[in-house]
Image (spheres, rainbow, N blue to C red):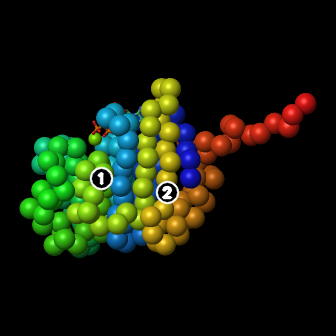
Amino acid sequence: MRLELSDVDATEALANALARTQPTPAIVYLHGDLGAGKSTLARAWLRALGVTGAIRSPTYTLVEHYPLHGAARALHLDLYRIAGAGELEFLALDDAGADLWLVEWPERGVGALPRADLQVDLAVRGAGRDAVLSPGSPAGTEWLAGLSKIVACEPLLTPADRNSVQLPDP
Ligand SMILES: Nc1ncnc2c1ncn2[C@@H]1O[C@H](COP(=O)(O)OP(=O)(O)OP(=O)(O)O)[C@@H](O)[C@H]1O
Ligand SMILES: [Mg+2]
């Protein structure tokens, strides 16, 4: 699924839609260059799940933990600064049993992370962002099917191919 996110409000609308439809557990890899909008999406997602306190960037701590409703928990990771995937062992992530994983720079933790249910690729496009969402598991495929129903009636979320209708040759 390809979406045009023309401003931060659109990124927040996507985060809301993802939070409303996510399976449990949900492992999400957030790809994209520096400044692509990964943290913006993660922060809005945690807010949508009811996190009201400070949402710190895990840039230096690598991981931040958030209690959610009931006994549910979320992890927000930013692996930009890890020296190698081996460093993740010291974070005892397997014991965390989290219901939601939001992982920035997952390519730096290859081999030490659980498999993604959903991969989100963000890229700068003009003043906004492009988002490409791909499933990584059967749960992810079902998730995207549910998400597409919300996208269809959320005005801030524009499928990218709506503007690239093929015109027949004259
Ligand atoms: N859809 C959007 N349209 C325009 N600007 C956006 C959009 N989404 C996020 N931004 C802006 O992009 C900037 C960078 O965002 P953010 O910090 O989330 O990037 P990041 O991918 O986490 O970067 P890093 O890899 O450095 O952690 C912020 O100023 C944010 O407001
Ligand atoms: Mg970030």
At a point 42% along the width and 55% down the height, the residue shown is 119
Left or right relative to 27: residue 56? left
Mark number displayed over residue 126: none
Residue annotated with mark 2:
134
Q: Nearer the viewer, residue 114 or 28?
A: 114
Q: Is residue 5 visible in this depiction of the protein?
A: yes
Q: Which label is found at residue 106?
A: 1
Instruction: Name the outermost residue toward the left.
Output: 90
Seen at 68% across and 37% down, the residue is 163
Is label 2's Cβ within 8 Å of ligand 1? no
Q: How far apart are marks 2 and 1 (CA)?
A: 15 Å
- Quadrant location of ligand 1? top left
Mark 1, other Cα within 10 Å: few <14 / some 14–19 / many ≥20: many
Question: In x, y percent, where is residue 94?
Answer: 19, 71
The quadrant in which residue 11 appears is top left
Up/down of 162 relative to 18, above or below: above
Q: Can residue 43 be seen in this view?
A: no
Q: Label 2 amino acid?
A: Ser
Does the beta carbon of the residue at mark 1 sit less than 8 Å from ligand 1? no
Image coordinates of residue 84 in percent, x first then y, are 16, 52
Q: Quadrant of the C terminus?
A: top right
